[in-house]
Image: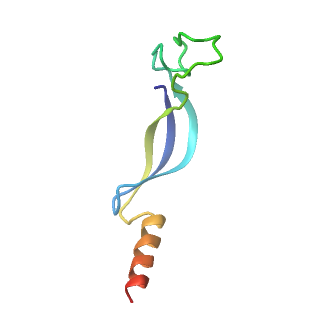
Amino acid sequence: MCWEECCGNQHRGCPHFVILYHSGEKWDCGSPTCALSSAHIHKNSRTCSCTRTYRERRRVLNLIQEPCDACKEAALAARVRRR
């Protein structure tokens, strides 16, 4: 799988990485079975079943000590349901 760089915030209060934007940087994996690679073997085939998704290469911009917003909302909803 080829790589695409994404930049975002790493939360230490939960294991989540929240993507802010994609930088546009891409790396070729050189695999013949990756449809995004320059070494792809089925270049002219219409029925190619090779992988067409990028793998994320994460660049941490901010290291945040709290949980992400989605985890905070889930924790609040769980507390409200218990009452």
Q: Is residue 28 left or right of residue 46?
A: left
Q: Is residue 15 left or right of residue 22?
A: left
Residue 54 at what x, y percent from top left?
A: 51, 32
Q: Quadrant of the C terminus?
A: bottom left
Image quadrant of residue 31? top left
Q: Is residue 82 left or right of residue 20?
A: left
Q: How is the image coloured?
A: rainbow
Residue 18 at what x, y percent from top left?
A: 48, 53
Q: Residue at x 34, y 59 (%)?
A: 12
Camera-side residue of 14 and 64: 14
Residue 70 at what x, y percent from top left?
A: 47, 65
Q: How many marks?
A: 0
**Up-down relation of residue 83 to residue 71 (above or below):** below
Camera-side residue of 8 and 55: 55
Camera-side residue of 35 and 27: 35
Q: Residue furthest front?
A: 47
Residue 33 at what x, y percent from top left?
A: 48, 17
Camera-side residue of 78 and 73: 78
Q: Residue at x 48, y 25 (%)?
A: 2
Q: Residue at x 61, y 19 (%)?
A: 47
Q: Residue furthest bottom?
A: 83
**Up-down relation of residue 18 to residue 83 (above or below):** above
Q: Residue at x 65, y 10 (%)?
A: 44
